[in-house]
Amino acid sequence: MDRVVIHTDGGCRGNPGPGAFAAVLRSGKRVKTVVGSERSTTNNRMELRAAIAALEALKRPCRVKVVTDSEYLRRGITEWLPAWRKNGWRTSARKPVLNRDLWEKLVEASGGHEIEWEWVRGHAGHPDNELCDRLVNEEMDRLILES
C-alpha cells in the first residue's frame, strides 16, 4: 500500500460566508494539491470538504495520515462519529448532527484506506499547513473577486 500524507485546511470569511478548502497530498516525491470553494458556507463545512476531496483524489487504497488544524474534523471522525451513528445521527444532547451530509461523504471517502488522523496547531509554521492556509485564502480571494 502506498503511504500518503495529507494536510488539509478550510476557512470562510464570515460564518457563514464565502469559503474555500485546500489539501496537499504527498507520496514519496509526488505532490498534488486540491482546492475548491463555495459562495456561502461555514468553516466546519470547508474543513470537512478538504478531507473529503483529498481522500477522493486517491486512486487506490493507501495508508494515509491526514494532518489537520481542525479539532472538529479530527475529533468528529475519531471520537464522535461512532456515537452519532449509533444514536441515529443525533448528538449526546439529542440534536441532529450538523453537516451530516459531509460526515457521511467522509465515511464513504475513507473506505478502503488505513487512516491516521493527526491534529497540528494552525499558523504555527508547519510548511504544508501554511501552504494549505495560503491556498484557502487565495481561493477565497478569487471567489470574492468573481462575485
Image (cartoon, rainbow, N blue to C red):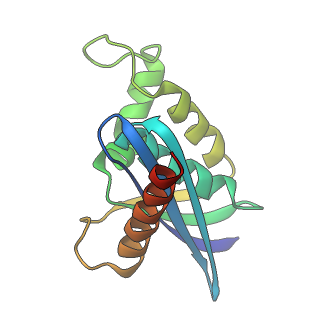
Q: Would you place residue 60 above or below residue 32 in this image?
A: above
Question: Residue 6 at what x, y percent from top left?
Answer: 52, 67
Query: Vertical placement of 144 versus 66: above or below?
Result: above
Q: Which one is in front, 92 or 141?
A: 141
Residue 88 percent coordinates (x, y): 47, 13
Relative horizontal placement of residue 39, taking residue 130 as reference (left or right): right
Quadrant where the N terminus sits is: bottom right
> Based on the displayed image, in which of its 4 quarters is residue 55 positioned?
bottom right
Q: Nearer the viewer, residue 14 or 10?
A: 14
Residue 8 shows in this picture: no
Residues 140 and 26: in front is 140
Farthest top residue?
A: 94
> Residue drawn 44% across and 30% down?
82
Kindly give the residue lying farthest to the right in the view shown. Answer: 59
Give the residue at x 53% y 34%: 102
The vertical placement of 2 against 12, above or below, is below
- Residue at 67% across, 64% down: 62
Residue at 44% of width from left, 55% of height from top?
A: 140
Residue in front for this viewpoint, 7 or 41: 41
